[in-house]
Amino acid sequence: MSEVAENAGRLDVAAPAIELIGISKAFGSVQANKDISMTVAKGAIHGIVGENGAGKSTLMSILYGFYKADSGSVKINGVPTVINDSHDAIAAGIGMVHQHFMLVDNFTVLENVVLGAEEGATLGPSLRKARKELKRLADEYELDVDPDALIEDISVGFQQRVEILKALYRQAEILILDEPTGVLTPDEADHLFRILRNLKEQGKTIVIITHKLREIMDVTDSVSVMRRGEMTKTIATSSTSPEDLAEAMVGRRVLLEVNKSPAQVGETVMEIVNLSVTDAHGVKRLKNVSFELKRGEILGIAGVSGNGQSELLEVISGIGAAQSGEVRMQGEAIDISPKANAGMRRARGIGHVPEDRHQRGLVMPFMTWENTAFGYHNEPEYSKGFGLANQKYMMQDAREKMERFDIRPPIPQLIASSFSGGNQQKIVLAREIERNPDVLLIGQPTRGVDIGAIEFIHQQIINLRDAGKAILLVSVELDEIQALSDRILVMFDGVIQGERLPENTNEGELGLLMAGVDPEAKA
Amino acid sequence: MNKNLPKWVDLGLIPLLTLMLAFAVSGLVVLSIGQNPIEVVKVMIQGAFNPFGIGHTLYFTTNFIFTGLAVAVAFHARLFNIGGEGQAGLAGVGVALVMLSYDWPHWSIALIVGTVAAMAFGAAWAAIPAYLQAKRGSHIVITTIMFNLIAGALIGYLLVGPMQAEGSLPESAKFPSAASLPTMYDMLGWFGIGFDKYAPVNISFFLALIAAFLVWVLIWKTRLGYEMRAFGHSEKAAVYAGISPLKITMIAMLVSGALSGMMAVNTVQGEAERLLLGAVEGAGFIGIAVALMGRSHPVGVVLAAFLFGILTQGGAELQFTLGIPAQMITVIQALIIMFTGSLENMVRIPLEKIFLNAGKRGRA
């Protein structure tokens, strides 16, 4: 040890790029990281998988200097390194690409790259230097971006490249990527992986945090699994399988495939005809969207987030208004003007599990018994006369729902924010499904939900379908769409880009549709 | 409210400690003007609680309960009603109009009519900013402040014009004496208990306590209160649940304005028995502090209102006995607001750490 310390400053070629030794970190009573040791070899792509809250992001934040570990130490290239903030991290050659990009929207690519690394009082020389450097990086790593484009004008995939360029411009030798593919189309994700392999060939070390097991299998050399703050497993990727990783993440065998019988499709319950939505900024979000939804089917809507799916759900659920078109429920047109509200939809038998459960689906500081009636709170069974709420019944109702949907801990007085993501989502699902709606709109059913709960939630959705209900499923997780849907619509830029049956398509084709390319038209 | 702390710490210990901190700093300020803080506290307490003072203390408390509840109700719907001053002022005009328009035969009828008028005028004055906020997005803080100024100017005009009584003072005619509300002296007299005959505290004090209870029922027991709280926590969630933001904004502000307005029953109808200039005397603004300190809970509001009642009356005594300027008391009030409102975390965070560590040791 002391020898290494003495040799600090001299590069030890054989030493691993990253060495974490006995890292522990607690937030209040929550032990986010428990005595974690991890080694990443130089020039490797290392994956870290784990459920939400397993401690992956905390660990990487410690490495990047956002948090200070309670105990443990870090060695970079064999040299003990104290990282107190991101400046230390950058100085140690560590770059991080955050899940939510840290870019200034109305700056150009070039300005963003230079931001925080300006040299001198005037910008000119730095910008010129950066322009040259960007050109070199672009050629070397397939990282081409127009340096003069504004961030707000380029796609998410390109924005991510800017983040990577920022790190490389700061001489990063170690690159950490937090959930890098969450916002990308499959095509963009493939491009990203090519970039990462290029970087690896040039000797860079890469750490990817993700919850997508397939990506781990595709791109990494080694993988660590985290569960409840502990590192349960570190293994060479070639000697493991998605099933094994899932088991290590959850602590038990998990069904990765969804078991479902063929759909018994009935008559049409809902028709969407030429629906168009223009937002407050005058941007067309939905352009003449038409489709039908039938009893007993799950209609999946695939697409990269922000291509009109949210607006579609908002109009059908009565939250937002449409400028033109029609929504028919059992043959009868329903009000899609700004006068409509979500209560009217519930009265028509349309339930809604919203995409954003923190902002919409739940009132976070409300107790569970208040949340399990939310939206239906004016129904007679929840009322007591004189405008009073029947709190006794609400409490009992919550207790029953919590039991049926296995919501843990089953205490109706707990506030929503004290539950895990999976249990929160189950509260929303319990509320909407138990109302027995004719149509259930579901947005991102498993976003931020642990693998164990995903299985349960998927089963509930299929049970509802088998009970003859119509389900409109919106998800940005292509795997989920493919696993659950009986029919798939792909949305791109407010348009239904194509319709496919899951058995007759594949990820590649859906990915092209998601990127706005019609594979049939091209052929 | 907070999962890390027991309820008694959250609702009891923290306000108490912040209050003590505020008093400690106030003590330093008192020292700096060459007065003895202990002497000052003694004079204040005596002034607020002696047989003459308590009647005033409770009178001020009544005002602050009404305005504090008003701010609290709006706050549950995340609306910051700064307009208590104007709403209470306008309510005074309403009370004066109905009191002077008819010879009400008995105080009980006068109380009902006066209360309804006060609530209606207060609510109406809150309705316009509420509508502008809900429909046009004009920020309610700005509009209610503007409405305070408009109300002040309007009342000034009325009292030197249409509503001015014969004579030179800018005030309305005196209300008919049959409509006089019973004072605490009268009411306790019914039970043979003695009280200061000239104390201004009157039946409105009990009206304030009833209002506090009804606010509690509204916020925590009714479906409307549930909708207001949901809207207050997340407007997006409220819209998802089919709750109309326009409806909730209007109702919350109407209730809030009506509560502010009820203060006029205490001041204009109960005490002055005529409309005077400056009848509200800043109680609308103190209501903000009261709601803040009372954590927007009716029980907290009543307690905080009592504290501010003591400060107001004790402060007057301070000026009278020790010649300490009235602004001094404003400084103390400001310190309390600062400590209980914005510096609460100074006490909360260390306490959370202490309890966390105690919990850890307890488990180990």
Image (cartoon, grey):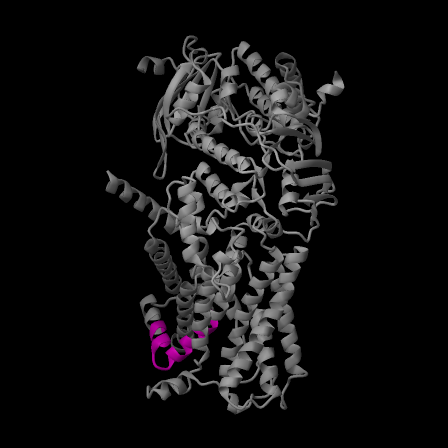
- On whether residue B235 falls in the magenta region, the answer is no
Between A334 and B244, the residue placed more toward the observer is A334
Q: Residue A78: which quarter of the image?
A: top left
In the displayed structure, does residue A496 sit left or right of residue A502? right
Q: Which residue is drawn at 47% across and 33% down?
A: A449
Which secondary structure is most common in the magenta stretch? Answer: helix
Report if residue B61 lies within the magenta region: yes
Q: In this view, does A160 lie to the left or right of A327?
A: left
Residue A359 at x, y = what percent? Answer: 54, 44
Percent of width and height locating residue B165:
62, 88
Q: In which quarter of the image is residue A40?
A: top left
- Residue at 64% of width from left, 58% of height from top? B133
Magenta highlight range: B44-64
Percent of width and height locating residue A492: 69, 30
Q: Can residue A484 be seen in this view?
A: yes
Q: Residue at x 53, y 68 (%)?
A: B284
Residue B257 location in percent, x, y? 56, 68
Front residue (pair B203, A307): A307
Relative to A4, say whether A292 is above or below: below
